[in-house]
Amino acid sequence: MSKPDKPYRKREIAGHTLSPETQMMSYGYDPKLSEMSIKPPIFLTSTFAFESAEHGAAFFRVTLGQAEEGDPEAAGLMYSRFNNPNMEVLEDRLALYDGAEECCVFSSGMAAISTTLMGLAHSGSVILQSTPLYGGTESLIRKFLPNYGIQSVDFFAGAHEDEIHAAADEALAKGEVSVIYTETPTNPTNDQVDLNVCRRLVDLIEKKQGKRPYLVVDNTFLGPVGQKPMELGADVVVYSLTKYIGGHSDLIAGSASGTTEAMAQIRGLRGYLGTNLDPHTCWMLLRSLETVKLRMEAAALGARKVAEFLRDHPKVNRVRYLGFLEEGTRDGDVFKAQSSSAGSTFAFDLESEAAAFRMLNALQVMKLAVSLGGTETLICHPGSTTHRGVDPELRKRQGFSDGLVRISVGIENPDDLIADLKQALEHA
Ligand SMILES: *Cc1c(COP(=O)(O)O)cnc(C)c1O
């Protein structure tokens, strides 16, 4: 929780604001509390001793929202399902990077997304979602949440404002719109959701129903380095930290950052569901955050080279790379307005599924795996893997082709990746 008054939560020196990449080495950690250790030790403990019975009582009052005069502003350390030093340092740094007031970390991206949606929506309410979303999120909203009385209405990522308004009217007819949920750019088609339009939609829906819906944005693809949804009006930003932020394909984790008001509900539910993150993984993520900007920038440079190679290859029908979007087009203008990097995950289309499989099987450097955002390049065929659970009709409407391949470019030398693709495409 942000308390900029503390010396280890310093945000500026002599009127100069410190940048997030600098803060990732220090923010939120006080060596004095850990034997002057430069790095935070891993606090492998389930519970924390109270200095006195009164302290323990005050912490629980604060946590349960029953604070009394003289109680501390934030509860001290209590129990590792609620808080832990490694969790707190990580949450402080992620909130800072996102420009959010608070952050909660979770045992996976899906834990972050499900806890966020269940914390902000309620039975009888409607989630207005853009589509396509990450396969797991799409299924959670369409197949699981209806069991709890939470319905949904969708609009296409690239829809025009009037189409989105029509979807909003449909949602309002079903019930109170509690959440507008979006993911941009989309996975794996790299369509753009216009966050300015979403922000106006929040205002419009508030006017119509008298209650403000929350705008939640999954920012996994471009990360805090390439896109800042909080600055564009989001109430909550969610991540699969498994991807670029973790960045080494060696952990599973998620986060939600946002306003104090929204996060209070999400944090509360996390405590009951127990979807929190363990101290060891928190520590690994602190290490990852120190290099996230370097890694994402290096991967983005490599991705541009790879995308340019693919664009010129006769067996590749289409390359859906953000860096190729042209100014003056709808997607190009939205991209330019809200993102500062084209990232390093994109899709390209081969003639057929069979051609895609032949190419994938011939690769020698890049690995065939789902997931993205690691130091190594990963490649997959979403139609038969990550998006298999999505209704084939819907997949067609979302612009999938049978030969669509997704690549997440890592930080290898891009010339090696190009050589690998070149020889593998011979088989396509
Ligand atoms: C991977 C991913 C998720 C789910 O995250 P997990 O850490 O696998 O639970 C959610 N959203 C997007 C965009 C993702 O890529």
Image (cartoon, rainbow, N blue to C red):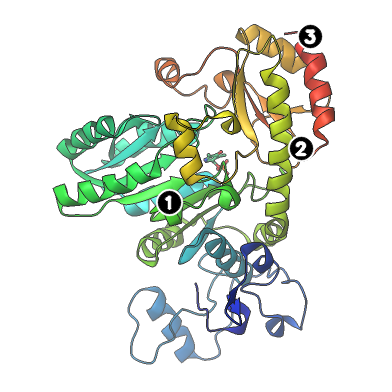
| Res 309 quadrant in image | top right
Label 2: few (<14), some (14–19) or many (≥20) C-alpha neighbours in 10 Å = some
Question: Percent from the top left, x then y, of residue 221?
Answer: 56, 41
Type of amino acid under label 3: Glu
Q: Nearer the viewer, residue 421 or 42?
A: 421
Residue indicated by mark 1: 115
- The answer to which of 144 and 86 lies nearer the viewer is 86
Which x, y percent locates residue 277? 58, 57
The residue furthest front is 328
Q: Where is residue 130 in the image (x, y as percent from the top left)?
A: 37, 35
Compared with 192, 256 (above or below) is below
Residue of label 3? 426
Of the numbered discs 1 and 3, the one sitting upstream in the chain is 1
- Residue on which disc 2 sits: 376
Q: Which mark is residue 124?
A: none
User: Mark 2: which amino acid?
Assistant: Glu
What residue is rendered at 77% in x and 75% in y? 38
Nearest to N terminus: mark 2 or mark 3 = 2
Relative to residue 140, is residue 299 drawn left or right?
right
